[in-house]
């Protein structure tokens, strides 16, 4: 295996007012579209990704709406095939799926202190996917993608929890959410014969400095 890069990219900003829910292999899950800011982020991400040299060997994506809408501008401009994988879907949070955050906080008095202390809360979700099950399916999905394409760079459009679940073990961190990836952030992993190494996290240069990717600055 030659040196190559795996880019794990979070979706654009979601429409927080959406109550859309879809059936998935792990039950009902919140499935919002991008909001206007998210759509603009997706366009700026496309400006960046079309300049990758060499272009990726393959592009994978979670089938949820917010990820599919994030990859769409890039796929259209690059003329690429996007492969969707159910194992890249965000962690299922059981009875909390589709609920406004305010309702979740009100339902459990211990949640707000945890948030204030920078502690994860999703493991408290009634009927939610366990940390171990989630971590195992994410690792299985990413390794399947990596080994299925032994040459060239790869792009995976997914979710914040998925990014944490894959990168955490690379850094020796066992925590369901040890950092919050920004919307459309690029998180790059170097791959070679010795394994995987984190190159860069939370890269949003296409949002902060879009002129570097040939895009006009959008208000």
Image: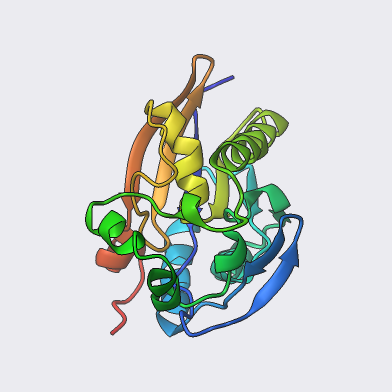
Q: Which percent across, then down, holds residue 4?
A: 50, 30
- On the image, which quarter does residue 58 sit in? top right
What colour scheme was applied to this rendering of the protein? Answer: rainbow
Residue 143 falls in image quadrant: top right
The spot of residue 9 in percent (x, y) is: 48, 53
Q: Position of residue 77 (x, y in %)?
A: 59, 68
Does residue 180 appear anywhere in the picture? yes
Q: Nearer the viewer, residue 18 or 170?
A: 18
- Whether residue 15 sits left or right of residue 75 in the image: it is left
Asked if residue 209 can be seen in this view, the reply is no
Q: Is residue 105 above or below residue 170?
A: below
105 left or right of 60 in image: left
Q: Describe residue 95's horizontal placement relative to residue 174 as left or right.
A: right
Which residue is painted at 28% across and 77% down in the image?
Answer: 217
Residue displayed at 72% across by 32% down: 148
Q: Is residue 207 placed above or below 185 in the rendered structure? A: below
Residue for point 68% across, 62% down? 63
Numbered label tally? 0
The quadrant the N terminus occupies is top right
User: Where is residue 166 drawn, in percent x and y?
Assistant: 50, 37
Residue at position x 40%, y 47% from top?
177
Identify which residue, 146 or 171, lies in the foreground: 171
Q: Tell me if 100 is positioned left or right of 74 in this view.
A: left
Quarter of the image that includes the C terminus: bottom left
């Amino acid at each position: 295996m030659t040196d190559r890069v795996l880019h794990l990219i979070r979706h654009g900003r979601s429409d927080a007012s959406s109550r859309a829910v879809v059936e998935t292999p792990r039950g009902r899950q919140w499935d919002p579209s991008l909001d206007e800011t998210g759509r603009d982020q997706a366009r700026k991400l496309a400006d960046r990704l079309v300049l990758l040299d060499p272009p990726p060997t393959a592009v994978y994506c979670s089938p949820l709406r917010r990820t599919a809408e994030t990859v769409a501008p890039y796929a259209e401009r690059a003329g690429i095939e996007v492969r969707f994988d159910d194992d890249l879907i965000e962690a299922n949070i059981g009875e909390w799926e589709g609920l406004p955050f305010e309702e979740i906080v009100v339902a459990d008095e211990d949640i707000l202190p945890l948030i204030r202390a920078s502690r994860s809360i999703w493991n408290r979700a009634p009927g939610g996917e366990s940390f171990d099950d989630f971590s195992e399916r994410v690792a299985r999905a990413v390794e399947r993608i990596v080994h299925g394409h032994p040459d060239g760079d790869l792009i995976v459009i997914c979710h914040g929890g998925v990014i944490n679940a894959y990168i955490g073990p690379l850094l020796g961190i066992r925590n369901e959410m040890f950092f919050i990836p920004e919307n459309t952030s690029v998180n790059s992993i170097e791959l070679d014969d010795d394994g995987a190494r984190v190159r860069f996290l939370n890269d949003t240069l296409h949002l902060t400095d879009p002129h570097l990717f040939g895009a006009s600055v959008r208000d």
